[in-house]
Amino acid sequence: MISLNIVHAIKVKFESLKSELDEKARRFWAATEANSLGHGGSRAVSKATGIAESTIRIGQSEIARSSKIQKENEVRRIRSKGAGRKPIIEQDKALLAALDFLVEPTSRGAPMSPLRWTCKSTRRLAKELSEMGHIVSHAKVGQLLSELNYSLQGTRKRMEGVSHPDRNAQFEFIYRQVKDFQSSCQPVISVDAKKKELIGRFANGGVEYQPKGKPEEVETYDFPSMADGKGIPYGVFDITKNHGWVSVGTDHDTSEFAVNTIRQWWRQMGQHVYPQAEKLLITADGGGSNGSRNRLWKYELQRFVDETQIAVTVCHFPPGTSKWNKIEHRMFSHISKNWRGRPLTSHEVMVNLIANTTTESGLNIQAALDSNEYLTGITFSDREMKTLTLEKNDFHGEWNYSIYPTKNR
């Protein structure tokens, strides 16, 4: 018979500890107290703590089972720590060198080379190593590759070719031009063409939320002959206002199409935002339909200038620096995100997805279909080019020039 004093002592201990114990800890504590009391311990602890005897017995069973497992582990150890089979790289000293040779031969002469990646499967590598006398599993090959600091990687676009010696100077020139125009409240736009897209139920990169088990079904192949046409987005991005216009062409990406997109931007957006505009600055890539050497581009700009009576200044980015064009990362990148994982089943879908692209910074885009036909192969003679009211800047006139209304020449 356990005395009331012992029951009272257990109660006092429990009251001081219970706020710090979770359910499992209370069960283990109660079971330990009961075990220390011997016969009648469960009933005494239950009376002192209010914990059911069945719960205390469960705790006692858990403690007994845990102790048994610990004893078995100690008994079953048949060798001292550190004994047993040696790691494979200790058994086969030449294994790592052989694997390194197979994965990246160029690393033999430059062990710190950053060009260390593999596209061979671990199973193929294990087979080749076995043929060389190194017996190893494909799973172990994967572990060894990690130890050698290899990983599966794709390619990364970083190489832009040889930089033009005046590359930075041209960037600085463009920056000053943009600031000058903005300070006088004159429009500044960035222009470019996005890659053409096939119209139809074709796969589009990225993922989008759909009902579980019901992904958007698309064609297995994306041959142009299977398409319902093509969409060519050409964009105009207002750098100052964070607004944009995109014309989705259906024919060819020509300079006439490019300038007509600028014309549509001016009619639909620009002239309403800049009613007092006297000049316009265009920043553009050095190639394509708005290329610095494209004569049709300059001819069509002259037509636009004569129509609007607004002088146009053009600044082209140096070769190989198109990614710095503002329209790329401030407008086109968001358009790509907006239609990710969705097939462009019609021109209407494409236009609507573009027009509904927004950002937290306030990007606003308007878009429209341009179904006009644009001829290719149009040429202009030197004599015809001399009729343009074009003035080249003293600094790289091939990249920086202005076109004025014909009557003001």
Image: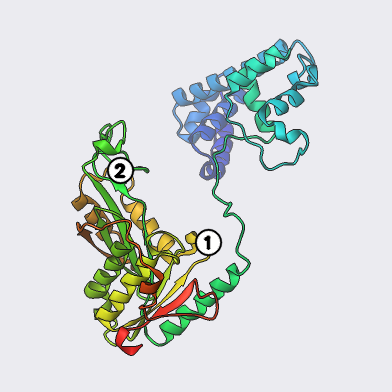
- Tell me the quarter of the picture where residue 341 sits: top left
* Quadrant where the C terminus is found in the figure: bottom left
Q: Amino acid at mark 1?
A: Pro
- Tell me the quarter of the picture where residue 372 sits: bottom left
Residue placed under numbered mark 2 in the picture: 209
The 10 Å Cα crowd at callout 2, few under 14, some 14 to 19, many 20 or more, is few
- Which percent across, then down, holds residue 224? 29, 39
Please name the residue shown 77% across and 14% down the image: 84
Please name the residue shown 63% across and 67% down the image: 165
Residue placed under numbered mark 1 in the picture: 319
| Label ID, residue 354 | none
Q: 60 or 7, which is in the foreground?
A: 60
Number of numbered markers: 2
Callout 1: SS: loop
Q: 355 or 293, which is in the foreground?
A: 293
Q: Amino acid at mark 2?
A: Tyr
Q: CA distance from mark 2 to mark 1?
A: 39 Å
